[in-house]
Image (cartoon, rainbow, N blue to C red):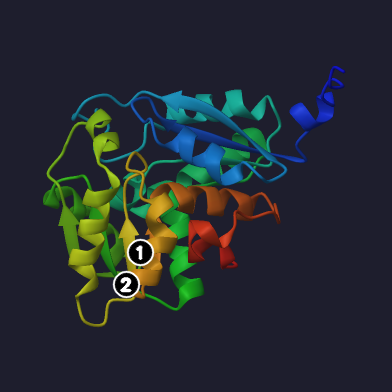
Amino acid sequence: MAEPPPDPAALLPSPRHLLATILPSANTVVERSTIAMLGSLPVAPLFTRMAKRGATDPFPDRHDTDALLEAAALLADARPDAIVLSAGKGAVIGLDHDRALVAAIADRTGIPADTPGLALLRALRALGARRIALIGPHDAAYNARAARGLAAEGVETLAEASLGLTDNLSFASIGCEAIAAMARQVARIPSLQAIVAWNTNCAAAPLAAQLEAELGLPLLDATALGIWGGLGVGRIRARPGSHWGRLFGLEG
């Protein structure tokens, strides 16, 4: 006897919420991570891209605000609950640039917006932490610049671990073993309060719970921070589970 056809609503449930994300064009991690984290939640992800190719940023000291506002306007057509710029550049150029950008997006679209950098500040406050280590695929000069940007916000970077890559697409090639090795390297620093994986094209989020249990420190991944931040500013109560780490148990 033939099985009955599946319920269409079960095959494609209607989401209660929409979380929209702008990501760099060479990024192959943000979409996969977002879909995985939101998979069991009543939240559907939406995506669009901004140009970011190779190792050269034509806007090294600011956001390409015009392009980002156009991207946000396209996402706003779908009326999402929130819009996230999933990029860590704000820490490098100064988080006042992120503040100005999310205000401009909200003014243009009427939709709240967030970035991993602004979400990081809220997550650290929720953890009662201000002494961090930065890890990621970048070169040490990039991490040093990010550390200076975070220092302006009262966040002290005690250590960094980096792999010397500069091409945006190459960042996604970093595997779990290399990410874990960087985390273990910096975890030995006395008085460290959190490890921050600062690149949205480097898949540290799936390692968070495992490394937190091993090292006894929260591990905050840039992509996960963007998702956490977007859920928060969008007033979406649903959250990924603890298997994605301590971050999603925080209020902020």
The picture places residue 204, in percent across and down from the top left corner, at: 36, 50
Q: Name the residue under label 2.
A: 215
Which structural element holds mark 1? Answer: helix
Residue name at image x 27 percent, y 43 percent: 175
Give whichever of 203, 157 is nearer the camera.
Answer: 203
**Mark 1 residue crowding within 10 angstroms, few (<14) / some (14–19) / many (20+):** many
Q: Which amino acid does label 1 sit on?
A: Leu
Do residues under tags 2 and 1 come within 8 Å of each other at their CB atoms?
yes
**Residue 175 shows in the view:** yes
The picture places residue 250, in percent across and down from the top left corner, at: 56, 68
Q: Which amino acid does label 2 sit on?
A: Leu
Mark carried by residue 138: none
Where, by quadrant of the figure, is residue 82 drawn? top right
The quadrant of the rendering that contains the N terminus is top right
Q: Name the residue under label 1.
A: 211
Residue name at image x 20 percent, y 31 percent: 167
Above or below residue 131? Residue 3 is above
Give whichever of 203, 118 is nearer the camera.
Answer: 203
